[in-house]
Image: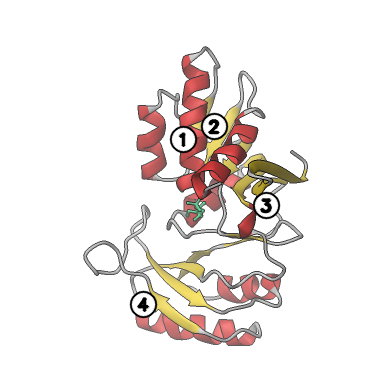
Amino acid sequence: MSGPDLRRAAAERAVALVRDGMRLGIGTGSTANVFVELLGARVRAGLDVVGVPTSEATRVAAEAAGIRLATLDDLPELDLTIDGADEIDGAMRLIKGGGAALLREKIVAFASRRMVVIADAAKRVETLGAFPLPIEVNPFGLGATRRAVEAAVAAAGCTGRIVLRAGAGGAPLLTDGGHHILDAHLGRIPDPEALSAALWAVPGVVEHGLFLGLATGAILAEARDGAAHVICLGAV
Ligand SMILES: O=C(CO)[C@H](O)[C@H](O)COP(=O)(O)O
């Protein structure tokens, strides 16, 4: 049983949640890509939905799959968002942004009545933080913002390296919004709410990858007895 099999199992369960007429938020990443592929097959078989993609990469994939797309200007309220995650804890708090799409992902999730996470069950953790926390920052004043982020991280009881994420070619990565990402290698985040508040207080921070109180459900796939099984958390 491989990672791709588990991603497919979670995405298959998620696509079964989609009903005719739904306004969907469509996530980013390898698991969300499988969802896009499966949703496209249902659309071609006659399902009528409209989707808001959370990244340029997802927009391209969804268009190629034949999914009708809109923006949050056209559709400010969505019925359901399906997205991946880098970590999920027992309270369905998430770390997201491994694919650098956290800003649009959070805007779309916030505009959505329900957000269901799809992931390999290996992403489930006791305490968030083993996955480096992505922090999206404005390029202006990067050095000062970085210092302020380090202070905010310390004030929230965390320690660790803050690394500017590089893109292809080694230059600092630029997100779809034209920002940089600082990855905070914290190991553990004892109080995600405190860290969230501390980061939001830094002017150059555009958004961070802690998704707190946004996920309403999760579909996690694990291998058991040579087959993929899904575990559902929350309302799915
Ligand atoms: O937050 C994300 C992108 O910004 C992704 O949802 C997250 O990185 C999980 O990706 P994958 O399904 O490829 O493991």
Q: Return the x and y of residue 148 as percentages of the image width and height.
A: 49, 83
Identify whether 33 is placed above or below 179. Answer: above
Q: Residue 76's quadrant in the figure? A: top right
User: Label 2 belongs to which residue?
Assistant: 75
Give the mark nearest the N terminus, 2 or 3. Answer: 2
Query: Do residues under tags 4 and 1 come within 8 Å of each other at their CB atoms?
Result: no
Question: Could you tell me if the residues under marks 1 and 3 are in contact, i.e. CB atoms within 8 Å?
Answer: no
**Image location (x, y in percent) of residue 58:** 41, 40
Residue wearing tag 3: 214
Secondary-structure class at tag 4: helix
The disc, 4 or 2, on the residue closer to the chain's N-terminal end is 2
- Residue 146 drawn at (x, y percent): 43, 81
Q: Disc 1 on helix, strand or loop?
A: loop
Q: CA distance from mark 1 to mark 3?
A: 20 Å
Going by the numbered disc 4, the residue's amino acid type is: Leu
Q: Amino acid at mark 2?
A: Leu
- Discs 2/3, front: 3
Per the model, the C-alpha gap separating discs 4 and 2 is 34 Å
Residue 71 shows which numbered tag? Answer: 1
Coloring scheme used: secondary structure
Label 4 Cα neighbours within 10 Å, binned few <14 / some 14-19 / many ≥20: some
In the picture provided, is 217 more to the left or to the right than 5?
right
Which one is earlier in the sequence, the residue at label 1 or at label 3?
1
